[in-house]
Amino acid sequence: MTDTTRTPSARFTDELWASTAPELEAIHRLEFLDLLGSGRLSPADFQFYMFQDTLYLRGYAQALALLSARSPSPDLAADWAGAARTASIEETQLHRSVLPDGPDLLTEDEREPSPI
């Protein structure tokens, strides 16, 4: 059973970070991240990673656009729409600089998000 008592000075997000610390540490120890960060990831694995990241950004931009469409105020809608634009255009420019033809070079099977 989880202790639901909170100290008055504790922020909810601090508690979330503390409760997920073991998982976050395990993620930081992943060989993939070590290879990616050190520049030792194979070109094929890096290309696959970039393709998957591009697919993620497309979905993320769509989710942000939905938040914009469902926002209760014009100001919030504009903020979410701006975030969607950033995700779909500006952040994707990095991927296009690395993968000039974008993820459209993927085979039909590779166009789905990776299960891993």
Image (tube, grey):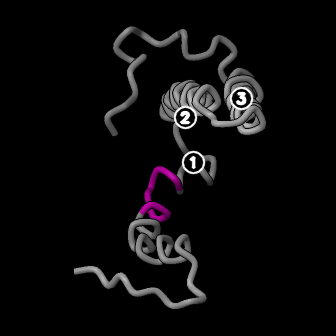
Give the mark nearer the N terminus: 3 vs 2: 2
Say few, some or many: other residues with alpha carbon within 10 Å of mark 2 (under 14 / 14 to 19 / 20 or more): some
Q: Secondary structure at mark 3?
A: helix
Residue 77 x %, y %: 70, 32
Contact (Cβ within 8 Å) of mark 1 with mark 2: yes
Residue 57 in view: no
Give the mark nearer the N terminus: 1 vs 2: 1
User: Magenta stretch?
Assistant: 27-33
Residue at coordinates 64% horizontally, 30% vertically from top-left?
68
The front one of 84 and 34 is 84
* Circle 3: residue type: Ala
**Where does label 3 land, which residue?**
81
* Circle 2: residue type: Phe
Residue at coordinates 52% horizontally, 73% vertically from top-left?
12
Majority secondary structure in the magenta region: helix
- Taking the magenta stretch, the answer to whether it contains residue 78 is no
- Taking the magenta stretch, the answer to whether it contains residue 31 is yes
> Marks 3/2: CA distance?
30 Å
Using the rendered view, name the quadrant where residue 92 is placed. Answer: top right
Residue 91 x %, y %: 72, 32
**Where does label 2 land, which residue?**
46
Using the rendered view, name the quadrant where residue 80 is placed. Answer: top right
**Left or right, residue 115 beside residue 65:** left
**Where does label 1 land, which residue?**
36
Discs 3/1, front: 3
* Circle 1: residue type: Leu
Contact (Cβ within 8 Å) of mark 3 with mark 2: no
Say few, some or many: other residues with alpha carbon within 10 Å of mark 1 (under 14 / 14 to 19 / 20 or more): some
Q: Secondary structure at mark 1?
A: helix
